[in-house]
Image (cartoon, coloured by chain):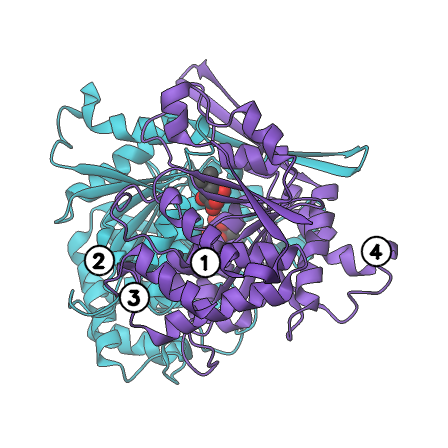
Chain colours: A purple, B cyan
Amino acid sequence: STLKVALLPADGIGREVIPAARAALEALGSDLPKLEFVDLLAGFELFTRTGTALPEETINALREQDCALFGAVSSPSKRVAGYSSPIVALRKELDLYANIRPVLSVSKDPTQKPYVDLVVVRENTECLYVKQEVSEMGEHGRVAKATRLITERASTRIGKMACEIALQRPRKHVTIIHKSNVLSVTDGLFRETVRRVPSLPEVNGKYDSIQIGEQIVDSAVYRLFREPQIFDVMVAPNLYGDILSDAAAALVGSLGLVPSVNAGDTFVMGEPVHGSAPDIAGKSIANPLASIRSAALMLRHLGYGKQAGRIESAVDEVIRDGTVLTPDLGGNSKTEEVTAEVLKRI
Amino acid sequence: STLKVALLPADGIGREVIPAARAALEALGSDLPKLEFVDLLAGFELFTRTGTALPEETINALREQDCALFGAVSSPSKRVAGYSSPIVALRKELDLYANIRPVLSVSKDPTQKPYVDLVVVRENTECLYVKQEVSEMGEHGRVAKATRLITERASTRIGKMACEIALQRPRKHVTIIHKSNVLSVTDGLFRETVRRVPSLPEVNGKYDSIQIGEQIVDSAVYRLFREPQIFDVMVAPNLYGDILSDAAAALVGSLGLVPSVNAGDTFVMGEPVHGSAPDIAGKSIANPLASIRSAALMLRHLGYGKQAGRIESAVDEVIRDGTVLTPDLGGNSKTEEVTAEVLKRI
Ligand SMILES: CC(C)[C@H](C(=O)O)[C@@H](O)C(=O)O
Ligand SMILES: CC(C)[C@H](C(=O)O)[C@@H](O)C(=O)O
């Protein structure tokens, strides 16, 4: 048997960190089925060269794989006609409805502040990300509108995913993030639908041990910074989840540490939470740890929990050891040196 | 001549902190025109008693005043038919299009970390706050949609306000907050319109000394926590501004310190950034400083800069002195004691 892994480095430091993730998978050797990698194209740079950011061939090839690793995509600094983010399109195209972003303090000692051990479970297909936007000239200049979509179906499945993840964690707590004091209809639907998940007949009482709370998004960001330890699993509509996961990443020292998977019912794609970082691209100083951890998270999602654990422990050791780190963590090592250090310990 | 001030304590600790703001204004004595206060009703509690959160009489009476001080409004813990937030309605009704939220570290020493000295200039009338929401039953359950509105007109005037504020600050820097990598039409319009403000013919080169930068909202929240000193004036669409100002407040130690004004061309309403805090309401431990500072900010906006400065210096002294503070700042004094301490120093 084989495990088919698509690699989509895309833009900027994506190209520097995806090879590190690949190397970590390979380092597991006979502990995994035979690995088959395929390199696929996507990204803003591709768009500027070819006029397409996400070729049909990439999507078709992805459907033949078991999983994928995505790097990062650059954002144009001006509006570019015809361009649309390939990562947003991929999430929708492959119905990867859950963006799962665990954020963990480097120190595992809960008395050390700030102690962060939470998972952002971000709905990944709707909210303002449906990108239904229109614009027209009005009496006083241009008028633009975007649609924010929240459905019961998507809210139910992301709610189930959040409960499923909470079930595997000691605290078994889910916080619903919303702004229903303003968006009573859309966020009201999200909030009520997720709240209802544990009592759905089809879940058969499976989530009865889970405690569900809620926070309004602005107050959630405030409390995340003041008392991050109160959060376990945070479940959020797409845009709030986007903002919250960056906020949580800031607390643990660097975006360069935070992994994610984009998960659907039949496919999973690992992706570091950081962006393409054009300012440091090409300098070999990008932190490969978020990307390596994303590979581990992807394995965990595919049922290879033990193998994921081997990668994760190796990363943890390198961080705790503290001598071989990239500049974002105060070190002065290169991407390849940090990667080598992890591989040694896998 | 008189200065007519409406007081709208509304809910929860709003009722405990608005009297403090009033007392601070009164303490200025002959340094201000004769003050005339009028108490007006609004809030969720009012709604539960009378079925209306913002009576017509309140709006009509407000139009007769020079300015107002608003406390805070509670959010229902469940969806309540017919209820809509009175503060959102007031901002729109009185066309208070700019929500100005200065956030400043307690210590004025820029070498102390985190050093924060920024102003969030939040558009206050549109974005998702237009509350145009619809919901219907679809094939797979309920489907809800909200409209996000961004206009050139509102983006221009908030951009001008941001430039006006930046002009009065040493760094003269404006950061546009947006998510145009996803919302290319709506946030694209916001970004391009604000960028264009300094070159508008009617501003006559007035803002030529201002430097304009930009940050994508998720990355802005990340950088706000990692290097808050890079920000001077942040100008943002409504919802991002809401989230960013809570994030910035977390950095300076307490929401209980952060004031705001809702400003239009002909009216200004001071409002602490904190909410109604039902958990501590009625205990006389609410921090009155945000509310007192909001009164000062309101005065500044009305042209009473010197008088505002007297209140602000008194608040700063009380904070630096550190012996009379409410529990949110680690003290054990009551609301009234902190207020008395400020009044003594005005
Ligand atoms: C690049 C951008 C479209 C993307 C998003 O907003 O989802 C990124 O911020 C992320 O968090 O993955
Ligand atoms: C209470 C709520 C409607 C309000 C808002 O979202 O504007 C509050 O969070 C604020 O920041 O003033």
Foreground label between 2 and 4: 4
| Three-letter amino acid code at the position of disc 3 | Ala
Are callouts 1 and 4 both on one chain? yes
Are discs 1 and 2 less than 8 Å apart at CB? no
Task: Say what secondary structure mark 2 lies in.
Answer: helix
Query: What residue is disc 1 on?
Result: A258
Chain designation of label 1: A
Chain designation of label 2: B
Q: Earlier in the sequence, mark 2 or mark 3?
A: 3
Mark 3 residue crowding within 10 angstroms, few (<14) / some (14–19) / many (20+):
many
Query: What residue is disc 3 on?
Result: B24
Tell me if B260 is positioned left or right of A1 in this view: left
Q: Earlier in the sequence, mark 1 or mark 4?
A: 4
| Three-letter amino acid code at the position of disc 4 | Leu
Given residues A246 and A184, the one toward you in this image is A246
| Three-letter amino acid code at the position of disc 2 | Ala
| Three-letter amino acid code at the position of disc 1 | Val
